Image (cartoon, rainbow, N blue to C red):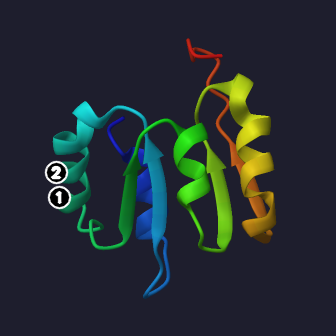
Amino acid sequence: MSAVATINLAKGLVDGGKLTTIEWNEDLKPIIDKHLADADVDQKVNVIYGKAIDTIPTITERIDILYIDAAKREYIQYIELLIDQVNPCLLYTSPSPRDKRQ
């Protein structure tokens, strides 16, 4: 992950807005931290490291936009875990046809 989608979403946040993202590969933390800082959005982004299926239950905030770009076979599980926290909004799932995790 180079954090491109996260950076673009964070740049569009209103003042005081926060973005929470999950990254399964904690080895990427130094790279992600640098990209977020270079884009001047590091104070707007909370990165949770771990498997999404395990870390989603730790998210307690209301969700305005749910953007999913992960292993396609797990999308329904993610949505089921988060559906009660999602405000009537936008759901976007990434159409990554080359995703090897499908």
Type of amino acid under label 2: Lys
83 relative position to 99: left or right: right
Residue drawn at the location 46% of the way across and 74% of the way down: 18
- 10 Å crowding of disc 2: few (<14), some (14-19), many (20+): some
34 relative position to 17: left or right: left
Which x, y percent locates residue 33? 21, 52
Q: Mark 1 points at which residue?
A: 38
Type of amino acid under label 1: Asp
Residue drawn at the location 23% of the way across and 32% of the way down: 27
Report the mark closest to the observer, 1 or 2.
2
99 relative position to 46: left or right: right
Residue 100 found in image quarter: top right
Q: Is residue 52 shown above or below 36?
A: above
Residue drawn at the location 71% of the way across and 48% of the way down: 92
Q: Is residue 83 shown above or below 77?
A: below
For the image, the number of numbered tags is 2
Q: Are marks 1 and 2 in contact (CB under 8 Å)?
A: yes
Question: In this view of the protein, which residue sits in the foreground, 79 or 69?
Answer: 79
Q: Is residue 37 shown above or below 33?
A: below
Secondary structure at badge 1 equals: helix
Which x, y percent locates residue 25? 35, 31
Which x, y percent locates residue 49? 38, 44
Q: Name the residue under label 2.
A: 34
Of the 4 image quadrants, the one containing the C terminus is top right
Residue drawn at the location 60% of the way across and 69% of the way down: 60
